[in-house]
Image: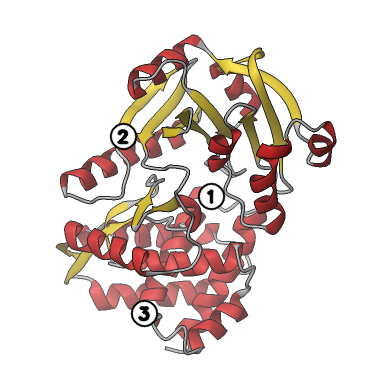
């Protein structure tokens, strides 16, 4: 994705109000307004100490040239192009909506995310792409959110718009309940348990295994084992797949909705209510409660900086007694399949490191079942 090309299609540069453009060591870039920056910085969700300091302090010291030099923040002037401004005004019912921008995590499915606000109020979010493959994910997310709404699931956004606008870009616009008092929760707690129990209860179905989304995920992995990196022990993956097919083929199984990226950076706590967004990888017919294993694994990798050995030690500890190893295998096969298919065998950076950890965890569990 050519981020600058996309930005130029919905933003006018060298016009409008003052913004600051800065990046981190991972190649992620943000564009934040000087006006109401404390509200705008809610879009910035750092996990490291330096990033958290930046989020807390930059709104107070952004006028200092020395501070901007230290964090390599560039002063820019931008405003929304007319078509984008009118669409957002219509959807959110406000004149001249304010915005902040995250240019996305560098990957095959990189997309731009805008937080839309007005004064102290955060109104919603708008995701943009010029990639037809990501646009298909937007369409799927729209259908997932509509389905969750019909089934009475709370704590998920409403889709306000999904389509092609603004210089040929695909847009996905959603509501939010986020406020200045919202919190990002990094440790598993009752709010997560409550959310996943509601999700499981309200979307529960009993289906033939072969009719589930999860079965299709396994079959995609089976068909593309050659896309796995060389360090993955394919015989272990094949063994795990065969065991599952032998156990479940031809049988009725319990399934429910699966968020598929249930992590602190895709949710926030407002009071005692958890609000979860970014449902673009979600599925409706998966084994229940796999999201807990994703939360465990991804926070271990990206926030605690654990390798597979530390995760295995956790599983063996008193604190990790809740881990059901058979369920963990279901989860690991899903995430290995998803990224194998998404990356088409070309693994780099965080995905490559994560794939190594997922592979080592799968090998350990299969060997010790």
Q: Quadrant of residue 78?
A: top right
The location of residue 310, given as percent across then percent down, is 60, 79
Front tag of 3 and 1: 3
Q: Position of residue 315 (x, y in %)?
A: 49, 83
**Mark with earlier residue (3, 2):** 2
Position of 32 compared to 112: left or right? right
N-terminal label among 2 and 1: 2
Look at the image and tell me whether residue 68 can be seen.
yes
> What separation in Å lies between label 2 and label 1 (alpha carbons)?
29 Å
Q: Which residue is painted at 48% across and 10% down in the image?
A: 82
Q: Which residue is mark 1?
A: 344
- Mark 3 crowdedness (10 Å alpha carbons): few <14, some 14-19, many ≥20: few
Of residues 36 and 269, the one drawn nearer to the viewer in this rendering: 36
Asked whether, in this view, residue 223 is left or right of residue 2, the answer is left
Q: Residues within 10 Å of mark 2 (few under 14, many from 20)?
A: many
The picture places residue 225, in percent across and down from the top left corner, at: 49, 62
Is label 2 in a helix, a strand or a loop? strand
From the image, which quarter does the C terminus lie in? Answer: bottom left
Between 28 and 214, the one lying in front of the other is: 28
Per the model, the C-alpha gap separating discs 3 and 1 is 27 Å
Q: Quadrant of residue 199?
A: bottom left
Q: Which residue is mark 3?
A: 326
For image coordinates 45% across by 36% down, the residue present is 134
Q: Which residue is mark 2?
A: 159
Disc 1 on helix, strand or loop? loop
């Amino acid at each position: 994705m050519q981020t600058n090309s996309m930005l130029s299609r919905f933003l006018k540069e060298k016009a409008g109000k003052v913004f600051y453009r800065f990046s981190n060591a991972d190649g992620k870039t943000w564009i934040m307004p000087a006006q109401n920056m404390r509200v705008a910085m809610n879009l910035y969700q750092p996990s490291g100490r330096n990033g958290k300091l930046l989020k807390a302090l930059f709104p107070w010291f952004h006028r200092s040239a020395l501070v901007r030099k230290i964090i390599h923040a560039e002063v820019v002037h931008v405003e929304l192009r007319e078509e984008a401004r009118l669409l957002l005004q219509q959807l959110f019912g406000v004149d001249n909506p304010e915005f902040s921008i995250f240019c996305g995590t560098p990957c095959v499915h990189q997309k731009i995310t805008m937080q839309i606000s007005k004064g102290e109020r955060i109104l919603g979010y708008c995701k943009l792409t010029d990639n037809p493959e990501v646009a298909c994910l937007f369409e799927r997310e729209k259908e997932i959110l509509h389905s969750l709404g019909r089934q009475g699931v709370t704590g998920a956004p409403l889709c306000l718009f999904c389509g092609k606008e603004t210089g040929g870009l695909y847009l996905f616009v959603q509501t939010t309940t986020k406020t200045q008092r919202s919190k990002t929760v990094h440790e598993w707690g009752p709010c997560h348990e409550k959310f996943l129990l509601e999700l499981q209860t309200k979307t529960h179905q009993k289906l033939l295994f072969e009719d589930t989304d999860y079965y299709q995920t396994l079959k995609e992995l089976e068909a593309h084992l050659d896309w796995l990196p060389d360090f993955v022990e394919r015989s272990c993956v094949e063994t795990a797949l065969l065991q599952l097919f032998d156990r479940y083929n031809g049988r009725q199984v319990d399934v429910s909705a699966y968020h598929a990226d249930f992590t602190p950076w895709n949710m926030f706590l407002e009071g005692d209510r958890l609000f979860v967004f970014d449902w673009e990888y979600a599925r409706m017919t998966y084994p229940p409660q796999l999201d807990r294993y994703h939360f465990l694994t991804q926070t271990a990798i990206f926030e605690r900086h654990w390798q597979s050995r530390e995760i295995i030690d956790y599983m063996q500890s008193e604190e990790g007694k809740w881990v059901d190893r058979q369920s963990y295998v279901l989860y690991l096969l899903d995430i290995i399949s998803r990224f194998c298919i998404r990356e088409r065998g070309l693994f780099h950076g965080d995905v490559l490191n994560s794939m190594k950890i997922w592979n080592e965890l799968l090998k350990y569990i299969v060997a010790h079942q």
